[in-house]
Amino acid sequence: MIEQLKNTLNQSSNIAILTGAGISVASGISAFRTGKNKVWDEETLTYGTYAFFRDEPVQSWSWYLNRFGSIRSKEPNPAHKALAELEKKALDDNKNFHLITQNIDRLHHKSGMNNIIEIHGNIDHIRCAKKHPTCDHGEPFGSLPFFEGIMQHFVNNPTLETLPRCSLCGDFLRPHILWFDEYYDGHSDYQMQSALSCLESCDVMLFVGTSFSVGITDIALRLLLDRNVPFWVINNEPKPPNKPLLKQAHWIEGKAELLLPRLL
Ligand SMILES: [Zn+2]
C-alpha cells in the first residue's frame, strides 16, 4: 500500500500534508492524549486555555514549561526528514507542496522544510496576552522570539512578580500557541487562510500521526470530501470504525518514521 501512495504522490502536482503529534513520538515527545479512548487528557483541556491563563497565569506558565520546556532540545526523526526530502523533490519538479502541522515543536523547521503552516503556533515565540484593545506585541499580528533567559527569573521563583511582561503595555507575556478556547483566525501566524487555500487546491492529501481530534482535521476532511480529493493516512493506530468522515481514507497502519522514508 505504501507503494501505491508513493505512485499517487509522484503523479500529483499539488500535494498537501498534515501532521500531528504521532510524527514526533519517535523524537521523544509524547502525545497530548492518553488512555485507551485517545481523548484529550483532562489536565490539558483545563490548563490549555486562555481562561485558565487569565485566572492562574503562574500555574498556566508552570504547566506549559513543565510540559513543553524540554521540547526545544528534541531533534527531528526519520519521518520529519523524509517529509523534508519529499518537499525538496516536489519543489525541484515545480510542484506545489504544503505542510500543515498541529505540532508546536518546530521539528519540521529543524528538518529543513520550507512551506510550513504551524496552525497551532510554536514554542519559539511568545506574545503579549492582551486581546481587547490589542497590543502590537499580541494578537492578531504581534509576537516576540522566545529565549530561555526570558523565563529564568520565573523558573527560579514562580510568582506573579517574576512573570515576564510586555514592554509596550505591561500585560503578561503568554505562549504563542492556540489554546482550546481560542480560534484559528485569532493570530496571523496560524496562517489559517493559507491552510484553507492549500486544502481547497491540493489534489492529494496525506495525514501523518494525527488522531483527528482537533478542529483543523475536521475542516480538512470536509473540504477534501466536498471536492472528492483522495486522502491517505499514516497512523500507528487502526482506522476508527465510527468516524464517517474517515470512511474514504486510504489508511496505512504503522510508524511514520518507518513508513515515510519508503516514499522516497
Ligand atoms: Zn502588550
Image (cartoon, rainbow, N blue to C red):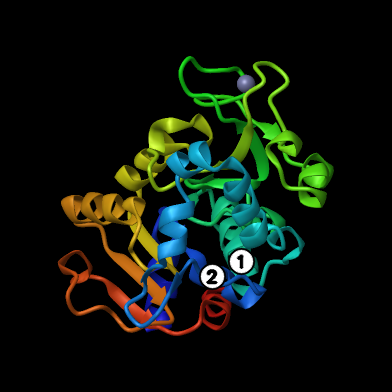
**Given contact means CB atoms under 8 Å apart, are the residues at marks 2 and 1 in contact?**
yes
Foreground of the two, 200 or 48: 48
Residue 191 vertical position relative to residue 210 in the rendered view, above or below: above
Q: Where is residue 71 in the image (x, y as percent from the top left)?
A: 69, 61
* 28 with respect to 259 (left or right): right
Q: Label 1 amino acid? A: His
* 54 with respect to 4 (left or right): right
Tell me if residue 115 can be seen: no
* 249 with respect to 17 (left or right): left
- Disc 2 secondary structure class: helix
Per the image, the residue denoted by label 1 is 80
Q: Position of residue 83 (x, y in %)?
A: 57, 64
**Crowd class of label 2 (few under 14; some 14 to 19; many from 20; radius 10 Å):** many
| Separation (CA) of disc 2 from disc 1 | 7 Å
Foreground of the two, 84 or 158: 158
Foreground of the two, 94 or 105: 105
- The N terminus lies in which quarter of the figure? bottom left
Residue at x-position 33% and y-position 64%? 212
User: Residue 23 bears which disc, if any?
Assistant: 2
- The C terminus lies in which quarter of the figure? bottom right
Q: Earlier in the sequence, mark 2 or mark 1?
A: 2
Q: Where is residue 81 in the image (x, y as percent from the top left)?
A: 65, 67
**Crowd class of label 1 (few under 14; some 14 to 19; many from 20; radius 10 Å):** many
When asked about the image quadrant of residue 124, the answer is top right
* 236 with respect to 146 (left or right): left
Foreground of the two, 31 or 239: 31
Q: Where is residue 23 in the image (x, y as percent from the top left)?
A: 54, 70
Ligand 1 position by quadrant: top right
- Disc 1 secondary structure class: helix
Tell me if residue 175 can be seen: yes
Disc nearest the viewer among 2 and 1? 2
